[in-house]
Amino acid sequence: MIKATKNELYKIFHKKFIYLVLIITVVFTILFGVLDVLSNEDDSYDNNINMSKHSMEILETNGLATSSDYAYQKSLVEMYTLLKDRNIDPKSPEAYYIQNTLFSYINQYNLLLVENDIKELIDNAKIEMDKSIKRLDNFDWKELVQERINEEQNQKCTDQNCEEIKKETIRVLEYRINHDIPFTNTNASSYIEEYISLYSQYINVKDSNDELLNYNDLYEKKQLERQISEMQYMLDHEIYTSSFTDANTGNKMIDEFSYPNVMIAIVVIVLSATVVSEEFSKGTIKQLLVKPFSRNKIIISKMLAVLITSIAFTFAFNIISTVIQGIFEGDLITIFGNDIVYNFNTKKCIEISYIMESLIAFIYALPMIILLGIFVFALSTITTNAPFALGMGFGAYLSESVFQLLIRRASLISYAPTLNYNLSPYMFGGINSIKELYLSKAIAVDLVSFVVLFILIIIVFNKKDIKNQ
């Protein structure tokens, strides 16, 4: 069996198709990386000013110079001009203040100019706008944070949820001051601000009875629980600092291993559809029977070779894609760091390396590679028709989204292998977004599908009239 499998692997690895796909992948990944870099370079103050001015010209041409859209574009021009004239770093606290606070005053003033002729309102809006602009002369971000703390402390709550949100908001604002994290467009600041928003949502559902919730609400609650727990862990362990940066490449690597993309599916399907059918179409299948191998060994060795190649290609493809993306992102080193993951089974967060988490994700996604491959392989063995096997293979790959739409109307569709062959949603005790899908069912469907297809392949191949091919 080992010798026969080696022979099949030798033939597969001499197919130019596999290397062509890898080359195409590298080229397109590099191309998208270059385009991403160029698009980021275009995101300058001058470019934004020019785009808004162009929009204003279009609105003027269409007779909309007194519309709210025109006032908005005019406000953008003034905001970006202010940022440019003061040479403000886009990631600075000043830039965040201008874009998220001052802009509202600028837009309000311009909106009144085009929609209202009450001088008192316009004058008051200008006073507020000028006052906010003046604040930039002696800008102190900690003063802004302290103002928000004072606002929260003065807030009157009428229920326990409000009190908890208020307490947590103050804690996080104080965390900003103590850890030197101003309001900016940096990762740490964005996550902390997002945490408060998510916490406000979670506090209102955390004590709800899971058994009384409909499944969609339960799923949303679980996602909030995961996000809140991971963020709280990072706050409690002071992982969010002024120098904190998101591990984009580390996270992308996990995604790559969790959900095999279309390029991987193409290789798996093409290999599975052609390995057997080619032997019949070329007439070389007769030569295999001359060798000292039984029919079972011949077909099993071919199947093993296809699965081994598919798994190896998937792994190599994801590694190459991750490395190239990491080079363009400039954070390839992050794949050697640790991720914070919430485990639903233990109700605790754990620190796990991105590499280990990606390997776990790879294992959970393996049934997809294996079942897709063996399904197409079975069709190829039964029909010896490569085009038919290819068509059915791509149909099966694309059927998942269609089945997800139909599952509400026909619950039996939940047993479709393509809805169950990727176990990634169940990592660390997670649940599927669709009520009818769950881990034990997925494992059972995957095992039954594999056994049925395997037996079918053996029976059909043993009964084929190869001598007359």
Image: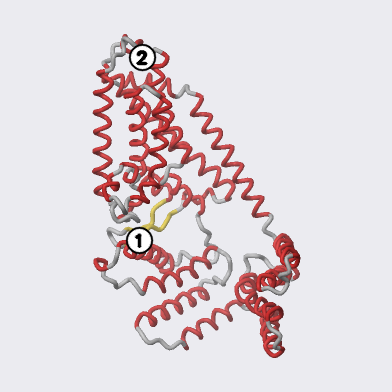
Badge 1 element: strand
Amino acid type, callout 1: Cys
State the quadrant of the C terminus: top left
Q: Is residue 60 left or right of residue 213?
A: right
The one of 54 and 259 positioned closer to us in this rendering:
54
Give the label on residue 285, or none.
2
User: Which of the two discs, 2 and 1, sits closer to the camera?
Assistant: 2
Residues packed near mark 1 inside 10 Å, few (<14), some (14 to 19) or many (20 plus): some
Q: Position of residue 68 (x, y in %)?
A: 66, 73
Q: Quarter-wise, where is residue 97 in the image?
A: bottom right
Question: Could you tell me residue 219's position as x and y percent?
Answer: 34, 61
At 39% from the left edge and 23% from the top edge, which residue is drawn?
Answer: 385
Residue 48 percent location from the top left of the image? 70, 62
| Three-letter amino acid code at the position of disc 2 | Ile
Q: N-terminal of the two: label 2 or label 1?
A: 2
State the residue position of label 1: 349
The x and y percentages for residue 276 are: 37, 22
Label ID, residue 92: none
Instruction: Residue at 28%, 26% (x, y): give it.
Output: 457
Q: Please rate how many residues cluster around mark 2, counting C-alpha atoms within 10 Å: few if below 14, some from 14 to 19, many from 20.
A: some
Q: Say which of 368 and 343 sits in front.
A: 368
Mark 2 → mark 1, Cα distance in angstroms: 55 Å
Question: Is 162 or 345 nearer to us in this picture?
Answer: 162
Dot 2 falls on a residue whose secondary structure is: helix
